[in-house]
Amino acid sequence: MSRLKSLFTTAMPPEVQPARGTLEQWRITVNGAMGREIAPAAESGGSIRTRMSSAAGIPGSDSCCPDLTLQQRIMGCLSCLAIGFAISFVGFLAWWTGHIASFGILYTTGNIVSICGTG
């Protein structure tokens, strides 16, 4: 009994300690897989811009338009989504009236414009 008690009362090394939450467990798993330490979000610091640009995991991922604010990025995304939806809807109307070739071109273009807003 004392051996069992001592087994559970000894301190575990940091890589074996149970995680506090799902995010912490994910961080420990990634650290083990990559062989390097990823700092928790609370310790990483940096501005919101730095954290958002590295959110995709690609260094310098916002090099195309680095001066855009978060609001401008969201407005651009929503604008592309709305324009793409409108083009796709016109394509649907073309299909409804029997213009199959126009439907294919407009619907595909609308989807491409909508997807472009996410990247």
Image (spheres, grey):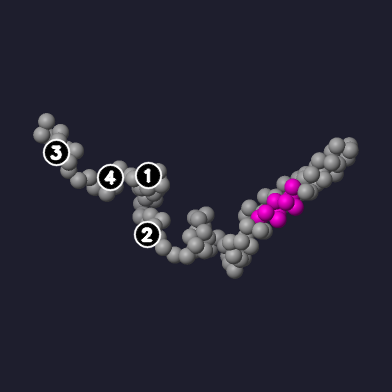
x and y, in percent, of residue 69 in the image: 59, 65
Residue 81: numbered disc: none
Left or right of residue 86, residue 67 in this image? left
Q: Which residues are magenta?
A: 77-85
Secondary structure predominantly adopted by residues drawn in magenta: helix
CA gap between label 1 and label 3 equals 26 Å
The mark that comes first in sequence, 1 or 2, is: 1
- Residue type indicated by callout 3: Ser
- Residue for badge 4: 17
The residue lying toward the viewer, choosing from 111 and 34, is 111
Real-space Cα separation, disc 3 to disc 2, in angstroms? 33 Å
Q: Which residue is mark 2?
A: 43
Instruction: Decide which of tag 2 and tag 4 comes sooner along the chain.
Output: 4
Asked if the residue at tag 3 contacts the one at tag 1, i.e. Cβ–Cβ closer than 8 Å, the answer is no
Is residue 91 a member of the stretch shown in magenta?
A: no
Question: Residue drawn at (75%, 52%), measured in percent from left and top?
Answer: 83
> Could you say where residue 62 lies in the image, as x and y percent from the top left?
57, 62
The numbered disc on residue 21 is 1
94 shown above or below 43: above
